[in-house]
Amino acid sequence: MSAEYRSQVESQRAYLLRYATLQLRDRDAAEDAVQETLLAALADGAGFSGRSNLRTWLTGILKHKIVDAIRRASREQPLAPADELETGDLDAPFDRRGHWQEPPTAWDDPDGALHQKQFLAALEACLAGLPAKTAQAFMMREHLGLETGEICKELGITATHCWVLLYRARMALRQCLDTNWFRT
Amino acid sequence: MMLSCREVTRLVSQRQDRALDFGERFALRAHFALCKGCRNIGRQIDFLRRAVVRLGEHGETAER
């Protein structure tokens, strides 16, 4: 293996670490997943040869390591109460007839906010506030781009529960951004 | 049959994850035509996907 290949792989460490941390929310677990990814990449230089983008290739390996880590953690962690199927939180924005208690108001230039560092920091803070499994399901869907069937399987939950976690995550994030960004 | 805002909001989330059938799409459109709150939540939930993608890219640009 060439020293140049080794240093190119190594130069992606910071990016990969951020990618893994965003998903796993645990610095140690993220470091482990990145370390395994780099070792696998260094052991398999031939796997990369001929591909155009080293980062894309490494990110593909990392995704598998992240899913492995989530699967392991899912076996060990009991479900937190806030991650349960029914907690009453999902019906709170609605009255008994299913109408909004307070209809959501429009956001002013949300796509403009995407270019602001402070907005992205606010989004990360909102993500950090989600219950563990709810956040995992949401990020597996939106960040790793997995299908819901795969997410249910890796988290060891039913399909209905999976829909509920994704719904809960979206409603909570929407509310958090509404309160902490768009209405301040 | 008119859907309630609660039902519409669940469908708005599910359309991010699966293809809605014709009846569901029709019911959503009919509801959106009359309900500003649900139009807003529809746009905002769509926006969350773009925001998370951007969060991932942001890490990429940050180190260049």
Image (tube, coloured by chain):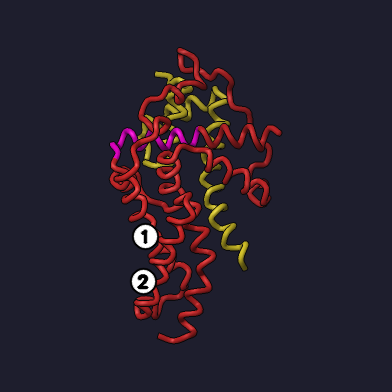
Q: At x 62% / y 68%, what residue is drawn?
A: B64
Which residue in the rendered view is the most extreme toward the bottom? A2
Mark 1 belongs to which subunit? A
Secondary structure under tag 1 reads helix
In screen coordinates, is A40 left or right of B63?
A: left
What's the residue type where badge 1 is placed?
Lys
Mark pair 2, 1: CA separation = 10 Å
- Along the viewing direction, whichever of A47 and A81 lies nearer the viewer: A81
Pinpoint residue A91: horizontal percent, then vertical percent.
45, 21
What's the residue type where badge 2 is placed?
Ala
Report crowding for label 1: few under 14, some 14 to 19, many 20 or more residues within 10 A (C-alpha): many
The vertical placement of B28 against B59, above or below, is above
Q: At x 55% / y 23%, what residue is drawn?
A: B35
User: Could you tell me which quadrant the C terminus of chain A lies in?
Assistant: top right
Residue carrying label 2? A40
In screen coordinates, is A66 left or right of A53?
A: left
- Along the viewing direction, whichever of A149 and A34 lies nearer the viewer: A34
Q: At x 50% / y 77%, what residue is drawn?
A: A8
Q: Colour of chain A?
A: red
Q: Are marks 2 and 1 in contact (CB under 8 Å)?
A: yes
Mark 2 belongs to which subunit? A
Q: Which mark is residue A65?
A: 1
In the image, is residue B62 part of the stretch drawn in magenta? Answer: no
Q: Which mark is residue A132?
A: none
Which residue in the rendered view is the most extreme toward the right? A184
Q: At x 42% / y 53%, what residue is drawn?
A: A144
Quadrant in which residue A165 is drawn: top left
Q: Colour of chain B?
A: yellow
In the image, is residue A167 part of the stretch drawn in magenta? Answer: yes
The magenta span reads A157-171
